[in-house]
Amino acid sequence: MEKSQVDPPQIDLLDEKFCQSILRNAILKSFVVSSHDISDGGLAIALAECCILSQKGATIELQKDLNRDDNLLFAEGGSRIIFSIDKTKEKAWLSYLNSIQINSQSSVYVKKIGFVSSESLMIKIQEKNICNIRVEELTEKFNNSISGHF
């Protein structure tokens, strides 16, 4: 009987270094308000964790790619970070992005997927509602999960 083996995602160390450099410099320039890596559980879990920790919601609109929706929402891998920026510094942020991407041979890119909102985590893919959960409910489920009973 042959054992199925799934290799972990490949990580390009130069891309990872560039990605971390962009984020570190953006933080130093006070563009970034918050950030969270997308690793354990993928994008949907990282967004939920951000909402729970900040007690703020998010409105996210994703474009369907060639992969399945579950892959888009839950795929794990390196060199992916979600972050929020200071809206009052949006023009300076876009100027900063233009200046660093012009000189880069990296495959790292930045894409706006949504914005911080007040009460709920709402995720849409191609205008299809995937979830709309109040932050209170996310927090309650997180704090009272199975692991909370041990």
Image: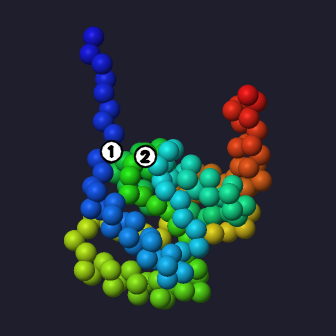
Which residue is painted at 30% across and 78% down in the image?
101
Q: Are marks 2 and 1 in contact (CB under 8 Å)?
A: yes
Residue 36 in the image, given as x and y percentages of width and height: 53, 59
Q: Is label 1 in a helix, a strand or a loop?
A: loop
Which residue is painted at 40% across and 66% down in the image?
20
Residue 92 in the image, given as x and y percentages of width and height: 47, 88
Q: Earlier in the sequence, mark 2 or mark 1?
A: 1
Please, is residue 9 above or below residue 99 in the view?
above
Q: Amino acid at mark 2?
A: Glu
Please, is residue 110 above or below residue 87 in the view?
above
* In the foreground, 79 or 75: 79
* In the foreground, 126 or 75: 75
Q: CA distance from mark 2 to mark 1?
A: 8 Å
Which residue is painted at 33% across and 67% down in the image?
18
Q: Which residue is mark 1?
A: 9
Q: Which residue is mark 2?
A: 76
- Residue 44, disc: none
Please rate how many residues cluster around mark 2, counting C-alpha atoms within 10 Å: few if below 14, some from 14 to 19, many from 20.
some
Residue 110 in the image, given as x and y percentages of width and height: 40, 70
Residue 43 in the image, given as x and y percentages of width and height: 50, 53
Question: Residue 67: in sight, yes or no?
Answer: yes
Which residue is painted at 34% across and 51% down in the image?
66
Question: Residue 120: in sight, yes or no?
Answer: no
- The colour scheme is rainbow
Q: Quadrant of residue 8?
A: top left
Horizontal side of 79 relative to 12 (left or right) equals right
Q: Is label 2 in a helix, a strand or a loop?
A: loop
